[in-house]
Amino acid sequence: MNGDRRLSHFGFTVEDSPPHPGYPQPPVTENSTPPVGYSQHVQPPIPPQGPYGPGVPRSTQATWMSRPGAYGCPPGLEYLTQVDHLFVKQKKEILEIVTGIETENRYDVLNALGQTVYRCVEEASYFQMSCCGASRAFTMHVYDNAGIEVVRIIRPYKYHCMQWCNCCKCCQDEVEVQSPVGTVAGYVTQMSDGCKIKYNIMDSNQTSVLQLKGSSYCICECWGDMHFQVLSKDGTIPVGDVTKQWSGIVQEYFTDADNFGISFPMDLDVRIKAVLLGAAFLIDFMFFEEHHRN
């Protein structure tokens, strides 16, 4: 085509069709008056957009958090320097609601003002989704406003004969968090502590930084929020929490659209904040995905 290439609002280019023969477009400049019968249209400036990965939501309806200026942290984690709360909202998948077939999960991560900080898209094989359910391996791609993947959360498959049977490493659930992609920011690993829910939050050197504790693997399937405490590395001082928020009976029992709140100290290393985001996804899969499927 001979039309001009323009950057669309979604981050990719489209080509305008050439004028229809016999109907040339009138020349209109920014300061000129359009001919009679034509209305003047000024294209608003479009901010530059980065390349979107496969499957990234491209909705233009969200209000995005402005990117703050920050140095000394991985690109894309600047947002986390300004927040001590994150809200993870899972998007409802119509196909899953109607058919009951497990689909890849998608999430919006919001700040306390309701502004979108990140969008997250799960990548998992259809075989694992069908056969392994909530125990499946997955890669969670976390994108910023420019459509650039700034965090990657990787969960390997672990065999679970029983969820609380975590005495050996081959059964202990874990996720690896990368930021930037390809560089390890930290790990979340399940700890052996009888029937108690316990995770180790570690940095890139596998040094313990925080602990995450819940009540028991025998989670009461009752109404209300469910809390997981974020504790100091020795497990004595509460510094935050991860809360699975009650979403109403219809959403809780007929979809797997879960909502989580995450709180942490404002001055916590942004890499560890990203690791706590990974912990919320691990908790969602371990305790709430299978419950909804059942």
Image (cartoon, rainbow, N blue to C red):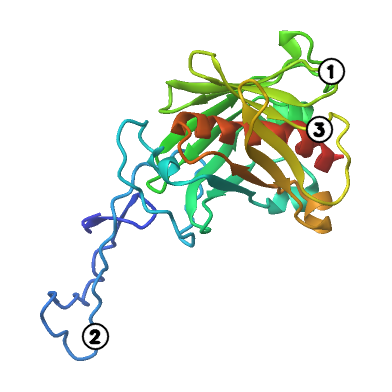
Task: Measure how far apart labels 3 and 1 are at the Cα level.
Answer: 11 Å
Instruction: Identify which residue, 155 or 164, lies in the foreground.
Output: 164
Instruction: Identify which residue, 118 or 97, lies in the foreground.
Output: 118
**Residue assigned mark 1:** 194
**Residue assigned mark 2:** 38
Q: Residue furthest front?
A: 236
Which residue is located at x 25 percent, y 84 percent? 39
Q: Look at the numbered disc 1 and give the secondary structure of its residue.
A: loop
Which residue is located at x 14 percent, y 77 percent? 28
Q: Residues within 10 Å of mark 3 (few under 14, many from 20)?
A: some
Q: Earlier in the sequence, mark 2 or mark 3?
A: 2
Q: Quadrant of residue 208?
A: top right
Residue type (three-letter) at the residue carrying disc 2:
Tyr
**Residue assigned mark 3:** 215
Image position, residue 219 (x, y; %) = 86, 36
Q: Quadrant of the C terminus?
A: top right
Could you tell me if the residues under marks 3 and 1 are in contact, i.e. CB atoms within 8 Å? no
Q: Residues within 10 Å of mark 1 (few under 14, many from 20)?
A: few
Q: Look at the numbered disc 3 and give the secondary structure of its residue.
A: loop
Q: Quadrant of the N terminus?
A: bottom left
- Does 170 sit above or below residue 106? above
Instruction: Identify which residue, 110 or 229, lies in the foreground.
Output: 229
Residue type (three-letter) at the residue carrying disc 1:
Gly
Task: Measure how far apart labels 2 and 3 are at the Cα level.
Answer: 68 Å
